[in-house]
Amino acid sequence: MKPLLTAIFALFISHAAQAGVAIEHWTTANGARVHFVAARSLPMLDVQIDFAAGSMFDPADKAGLAALTRGILDLGAAERDETLISEQLADLGAVLGGGADTDRASVTLRTLSAKDKLEPALAILRDILRQPRFDAAILEREKTRTITSLKEAMTRPDSIAGKAFWEALYPQHPYGRQASPESVATLSRADLLGFHQRLYTAGNASITLVGDLSRQQAEQIAAQLSTALPNGAAPTLPPPPAPAKATSQALAHPASQAHIYLGMPSIERGHPDYFPLLVGNYTLGGGGFVSRLVKEVRDKRGFAYSVYSYFAPLRQTGPFQIGLQTQRKQAGEAIKVVREVLGDFVNKGPSEEELVAAKANLSGSFPLRLDSNSKLLANVAAIAFYSLPLDYLDQYQAKVQAVTAGDVKAAFSRHVRPADLVTVTVAAD
Amino acid sequence: MTMRHLLPVLLAPWLLTAALANPYETTLDNGLRIIVKEDNRAPTAVHMVWYRIGSMDEVDGTSGVAHVLEHMMFKGTPSVGPGEFNKRVAAAGGRDNAFTSRDYTAYFQQIPKEKLDEMMQLEADRMRHLTVDPKEFAQEIKVVMEERRMRTDDNPQSKLFEQMNAAAFQAHPYRRPIIGWMSDLETMTAADAKAWYDTWYVPNNAYVVVSGDVKHQEVFALAKKHYGALPSRDLPPRKAQVEPRQEGTRKLTVKAPAELPVLIMGYKAPIIRDPKTDQDPYALQILAAILDGHDAARFNKKLVREDKVALSAGIDYDNTARGPGMLFLYGSPSEGRSVDDLEAALRAEIKRIQETGVSETELKRTKAQLVAGQVYKLDSMFGQAMEVGQMEAVGLHWKDVDVMLAKLQQVSAADVQAVAKKYFNDDALTIGILDPQPLDGKPRRPGVAIRH
């Protein structure tokens, strides 16, 4: 459940030369926000319904509730048990998906758009929204499976490091709270029903439709999905996370490689510094093979196969993170190199040449971010869920191009303070 | 793939404009084939160069060299400096990477469509003029060793799978891991990588796949311009290495830090060699879908949901490859259940098909999923290029996809029952077990109490 990397894009309509996304937006009678993009080249439809029902809404002593609620949501609804739901969707060639992260719980459906496939598939989806069963026997089974999976995850160096990292970044905030075998064991059916009743409501939902529909069809489908949901409002958010304090943790593990994470809480979605940070981070550790971290850690020294940095803006202050894995005996040396690269970048910012290269790639690669219905769905759903401006995609390239080296330096000095970084290592000597 | 076979099923007029001859192909005088899949939904393109050379072509002592060379392909030519390839792709607004398998090595760029010319220039340059600099090699081999530590040495499931292959295959090179044994990486030299490149990286051992918003005539012209002048060269003969018939169950255990045991049961299984006349590989693919094709398919429904003997259970079977095939049943037992319990449960599901077959409903369901999948796959430009590339890599023709889909639609319940009886044979079985070890080397404490 890694928070989604930020990246938001536009539709290039078939045969049309100009960038621009025709996102249509309206609100249903009972308050669900709808975003629709007609994409009529392929006879298929993608639907995504997002609720502000991620793990940030887990009560303090019930970590794992959001994930379990979403996990069981589609395992039996109204007249259908879990088997019938899967079998009937498979008969239609439809695919149900989704999950929960820190911020949202999502339900997705991909179906053919031919009427005899579309209508029965949507009917199943509506039942899942209207009347999930939360069957007690299934809850017990899934709790057991979740607990076993959590125990398995806690034997793996990357999972151990990830858990410790988020706990260290957010000691007082729900973002730092992680499901454990103990917390999941306490979850009851009443907990799930309460969570569902409070958060899986029309007023807390955004519905995104991408595919082979007319506006009229889209309105009708959205209205029916929305009507299936109970009335309700968006929840109050927890108080924002406190600024990070530098901490350092070294956890033991027998692995051959050390897993290393450095970072701090940084920015939320929609923050005005987002574009300077995006452009700057391309040079630091976001630009794949051409970033400074890859050059120094991988190319020059052969320390790691993978080394990266990114900003993951969330509903509330999301993290800036650097990650790598290296042979356990050279972990200290690798961290030293990472800190030097970061310190130098924060002090001096990108060179003019680096800035030009970053903008050329981020702006030039823009069409690649929206050349399929599934990419469009992901991006429009993010706009919908985070209430970003409808012209966000149209403005993307201009906002990238407008960033100066001074903007990058100023934004990094505000949001990445090397002295305050949280460091977690697992399996370092 | 072409869409002819879909027309009767979907009656979709949107297909007609694109369907007629798409993809298109041509062959240059030097033997390089060019295959173009036009798709003008977005102004982007995918450019891939596939080499018919993978880890199965390696020899003992230099395992992993195909993959190491793939890394070295980014380290420069006389006209493009080390790291410059990535820089040029990035400046073009593109993304690039490469992958090595047992059967092939492939390189790709995803780009705004107008950058295809420049990408072909770069790929053509490194098809002929790669520099394998010993200093660059010395750094890069360390990166590959880190990659091996990450992917295999610290990943208990991968380690188990590596051992499975090493036990299931004895004569055939599929016994070696793609990434190579660590000791082979430690002793590998720049000269090994250079020899590999000089032997295999020639246009007559490669093909180019382009998908996206392009015109095939223009792509052919660009390909001729950039790749046309590269000389072809005879390839060394590839000697068939035939795996002898397995004559008894093999069993192995891997101990590694983990919580859960893992069981893999691998059976030798057939591969599609003649798409038109082969039967069994199609029936096995349908069998796999009936067991594990959706959340209420037999394995998940019975073993995970009803009997709760497994935390997860699945089947993995790829019926196309250059080398021999295997079908894997795998899973992890639930807490309190043993690997033996899981093995018995997996065997019982196979036995059920052997004795009572599969239903028409299950068969129809699987075929409906296949038809829908043919539409969904068109959503990905990259996926369309991959499909063409992978078909060609295993010695089939991209046009065979149509034949294969038609053959799958013809599989009957009796066919499925027949292959269930024929291939789940203990003498052709290799069993691998991950035996989980505590992280600190101490005996496990009892886990958290679970209320039922």
Image (cartoon, coloured by chain):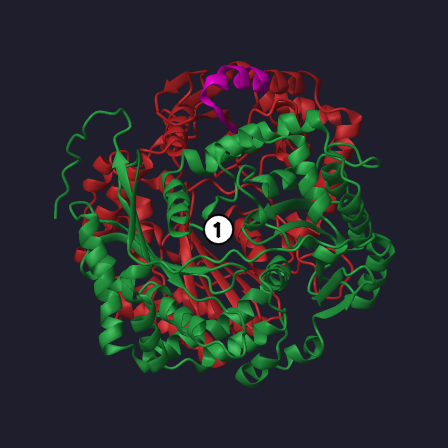
Q: Nearer the viewer, residue A292 or B137?
A: B137
Residue B295 appears in which quarter of the rendering? bottom left
Residue A279 appears in which quarter of the rendering? top right
Secondary structure at numbered mark 1? helix
Q: Is residue A360 left or right of residue A309?
A: right
Number of numbered discs on residues: 1
Chain containing the residue with disc 1: B
Residue segment shown in magenta:
A323-339
Q: Is residue A39 visible?
A: yes
Q: Which residue is mark 1?
A: B174
Q: Nearer the viewer, residue A141 or A205?
A: A141
The residue at 57%/45% (across/down) is B58
The residue at 70%/43% (across/down) is B197
Instruction: Give the drawing colour for chain A.
Output: red
Residue A12: x %, y % from top left = 70, 59
Q: Of the residues shown, which amino acid type is indicated by label 1?
A: Tyr
